[in-house]
Structures are given as structure tokens and as C-alpha cells.
Amino acid sequence: MRLILLGPPGSGKGTQAAKLAQTFCVPQISTGDLLREERAGATALGKQAAACMDRGELVPDDLVLQILQVRVSKPDCDKGFLLDGFPRTVPQAEALSAILEALGVQLEAVVDIEVPDGEIESRITGRRSCPVCAAIYHVVTQPPKTDGTCDRCGGALTQRSDDSAETVRNRLRVYHEQTQPLIEFYRATGCLHEIDGVGDPAAIAASIREALGA
Ligand code: AMP
């Protein structure tokens, strides 16, 4: 199974991607996570990406495509993968089509999780994540059992530097301008599934599985 998960920042994409990757036994590839790894490793690419990420802007297509191409060529992607946060621009989607064609494989589904901007802003500033195992929480809707501590591994939860209210508004503007046009791009391919992303995460996961016939 090769699929893409689209949706604005804070739509629950990461949470749903983790569930779906388990359902289909494929790796979850988040370009945001890959870029954060590059930053943490202080690589040349990570340093170039850092300023754009902190402003809530997109990292240039050529940098993101470099890390994506390396990642999808790894052996664990032979039987499929789930892309989370990629593509984010029409040129990235076009480049992905070319990469898949060169690998001789096809995209089977694109899932778009839809959430209104107002809901996103209130959700995202409460988001916390574990820097050790990447588990995601929310201070109100999905709190850890012990305040500030990861249930899974005991790591100290942190807020991402780009989850501040001002950066979130910028990320939403960027999403509408640059990423939303992908919905039309993939609608034309006939493999787009549009899912209402407001409500209980388990119910949303069930709607996605139903849409995909899983
Ligand atoms: P995310 O974790 O998916 O919200 O991504 C965090 C940040 O990484 C974004 O705000 C962008 O600055 C950058 N980023 C992640 N994926 C991409 C992509 N496909 N294209 C450009 N920038 C990206």
C-alpha cells in the first residue's frame, strides 16, 4: 500500500498516520520528522531548513525532495509506505509522481483530513510531543497520565518550537496558499478520499479505514 495523508497542521494527521501505518504494515514517513532529525544532527541540510521551519514556512522543494528520495528508496519501503506531510506543493507532487514512476510503483490512495482553521488554532497550541519516542499528546483532549511525562517511555514532553500561536497562523496561511491546491491535483487522479477530521480520533480512524476498505 502506498498512500499519502494530507491535511492542515494540527489536523491529527500524525496520529492517524501512525494508526494507518500499523494497519497496513508500512513505514510512516514524515518529512517534518526527517527535517527535525537533520536539524538535530546539525547537517548542512538541517541548517538550511531550520530558519524556514521556525518561521512556519515551507522548506524549499529541492531540499525536501532530497531527503524524501533517499527515504523511499530504502528497503523497508519495498512493500509500500505512508507519506505524512509530503507532498506540500504541486511541484513536490509532480516530483513524487516521477519518483514513483522511476521505482515502477503506483500511488493507491490519498486521504485528506479536513478541519476548520478556528479548531486548528485552539488544538495546536496544546500539542505536546515526546522527543524520545515521538508520541503525541494534547493537554486537554489527549493528556498523558502524569502531567508533562510520556506514558510510553517516561520522556519529558515538550512543545514544538513551531507550535506557537503566531507561527501556527503563518503555517495555516502557507497551507491554504501552497498545499490546498493538491486536493484538486489528487481529485483529478480519482484516488482522493476526503475525511471530516473533527471529533473523536478513533471514529476518524474508523472513517479512514472504511474509505480505504481496510
Ligand atoms: P510538520 O511536522 O509536517 O508539521 O512539518 C514541520 C515543518 O517542516 C513545516 O512547517 C515545514 O517548515 C517543514 N516541512 C515538512 N514537510 C515539508 C514539505 N513536504 N515541504 C516543505 N517543508 C516541509
Image: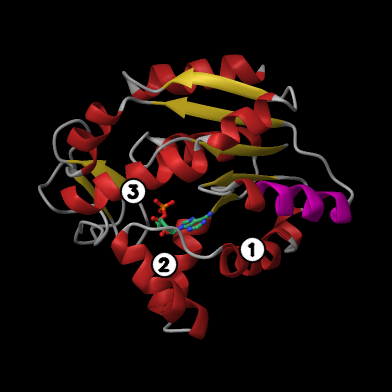
Picture quadrant of residue 75: bottom right
Q: As shown in the figure, which amino acid type bears the numbered disc 3?
A: Arg
Q: How crowded is mark 1: few (under 14 residues within 10 Å), some or many (20 or more)?
A: some
The question of residue 37 being in magenta is answered with no
Residue furthest to the front: 177
Residue 212 position (above or below residue 139): above
Residue 19 x %, y %: 49, 35
Residue 51 x %, y %: 35, 72
Q: Is residue 167 left or right of residue 28?
A: left
Asked whether mark 3 and ligand 1 are closer than 8 Å, the reply comes as yes
Asked whether mark 2 and ligand 1 are closer than 8 Å, the reply comes as yes
Q: Are marks 2 and 1 in contact (CB under 8 Å)?
A: no
Q: As shown in the figure, which amino acid type bears the numbered disc 2?
A: Arg
Q: Which of marks 2 and 1 is nearer the N terminus?
A: 2
- Which residue has dot 2 on it? 36
- Which residue has dot 3 on it? 171
Residue for point 57% across, 40% down:
21
Q: How crowded is mark 2: few (under 14 residues within 10 Å), some or many (20 or more)?
A: some
Residue 70 x %, y %: 69, 68
